[in-house]
Every structure is written in structure tokens, then in C-alpha cells.
Image: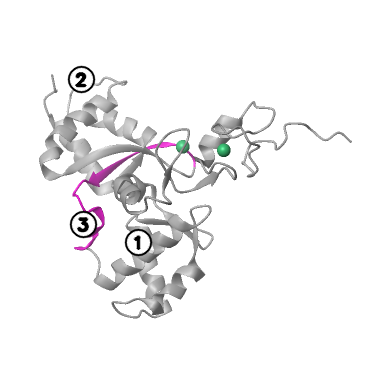
Amino acid sequence: MAAQMTDAHRRFLQMMMCKGIVEGSEATNLHKHCCETDKVYYEHDKLDDFIGTINGKLQPLFMQIRKGISQDDGKVHYALVNLAETEITQMASDYTETELELFRKTMDLIILSENGFASSTDILNLADQLKTKRMKKKEAEQVLKVFVEDKWLSEKNGEYTLHTRCIIEMEQYILRNYQDVAKKCNICHSLAIQSQGCESCGIRMHLPCATKYFRGQTEPRCPNCNEFWSCDTPGVSGMGFQTHH
Ligand SMILES: [Zn+2]
Ligand SMILES: [Zn+2]
């Protein structure tokens, strides 16, 4: 049943290898571009099948093009990921032991935080507590920059979070290694890093998922326990009534 791998599939894979991650709309454009360039019949609604054919070939290499959503805006992304059992160790060939320790500690901070962000100050304070080798703040800053360039972390106004590619790639690793704290989103059931939690039952939702869920409701209530949702959700007007002057 699986379709044959064509030059269009190979071209698409090459582009994924060089980009690492693309937004859904970019993947659609790439799909079209590759089919047109290599004169392969293009079916606009068959992107996932097209990727499925590539994934069939990638399986023996423990790689996969995987679909996930950005925690930031809820948009679909496709990332080329490594499926080797110990996901974090595959970073080992690219970074030193000390850099990896800084990454792990940063990941701890992000995952254990309330909202999925760690400040650069908090991360840089870890630099001289590393067990493998102390790092100067300047050095640590440089390493963080590389993690951002390599799409393991992303940074916004001095706050760091896990990059969408990192989450797509390491979802299973994170769920296994942070069993007590890492939770799935109550709405889309994928790992919730940048998220809000219910104060009474503890379920979590991504911000874009919460916004969508609460839209049109008169009062935001937890989808699980029905208690009032006390977090401020962007795009949702609090109690659902307007102030008149
Ligand atoms: Zn979600
Ligand atoms: Zn609840």
C-alpha cells in the first residue's frame, strides 16, 4: 500500500534535513514545490501520506518527520527528529559534557517552572555550580546562544523555553524523565510546557488551546473539574461581562 519513494520525496527530505523544522504552511509549499520540480503528481491534501512514505524509509535510521504544535501559537509544525532511545545522548556528539549539563539543568528549570520559562539570570546562576566544569557567565551566555541557533531552546526578552523542535523530538524523554511534573495538555493531549494549570485539580492547557477552549464561554471553567479558571488567558475576556461607563 505504501507509495514509492520518488525524487520529490528525496528532495523534501533533503530540505527537512537542512531546515530541521518547518511550519505547516511551509511544509505544504515544500510538498508542492518538490512535486512540481520532479514532475510527480501533486495531491494537495496528501501531505501526511507523502511524509508517511518518507518515514517508512527513515525508520531503519531511527529518524522520523514528526508533526507537533508550537506551544507559542498553537500552529502545526513538522520536525525531522531522531528516535534513538536516549534522546538526550544524541546531542552528545554536538556538545561537550559541560554544555550538556547546562542544557539538562536549563531543561529542569523550564519544566519545573509555573509557566514553562526560565530567566537568563537563573540559568546563568547555574553556570558556576556545574559538576563537570565551572563555566564563566560569558561562556554560558555563548552556549545558550548556540542552543537557540541549533533550535533546542528559544528565547524571548531574556526568558528561555524549549524550542518546538526540541519538544517534538524529546516529548517521550521528557514524559519519562519528569513523570511527576511533566503533563499533557487537557485539550490536545501533547506535552504542555508553556501552559496554564488549574488551581484545584492541576490539569494543564497550552495557552492557545485554553484561548480556543474558553472562547465563547461566559465564564472560564476548568474542563476537568469545572472550577473557575483563575489564570488570565490572552484573548479571553475574564468574567465574560463588559464594563459600561
Ligand atoms: Zn494543547
Ligand atoms: Zn480543574
Please indicate, yes or no, whether residue 155 appears anywhere in the rendered image: no
SS label for mark 2: loop
Tell me the amino acid under the disc marked 2.
Tyr
Which residue is denoted by mark 1 in the rendering?
147
Q: Quadrant of residue 147?
A: bottom left
Residue at x 36%, y 36% (from the top left corner): 26
Residue at x 46%, y 57% (from the top left corner): 112
Indicate yes or no: mark 1 CB to ligand 1 under 8 Å. no
Tell me the amino acid under the disc marked 3.
Gln
SS label for mark 3: helix
Please indicate, yes or no, whether residue 6 appears anywhere in the rendered image: yes
* Label 3–label 1 contact, CB within 8 A: no
Of marks 2 and 1, the one in the foreground: 1
Q: Earlier in the sequence, mark 2 or mark 1?
A: 2
Residue 41: which numbered mark, if any?
Answer: 2
SS label for mark 1: helix
Taking 191 as reference, is 151 above or below it? below
Residue 82 in magenta? yes
Of marks 3 and 2, the one in the foreground: 3
Residue 90: which numbered mark, if any?
Answer: 3
**Start-end of magenta stretch:** 73-93
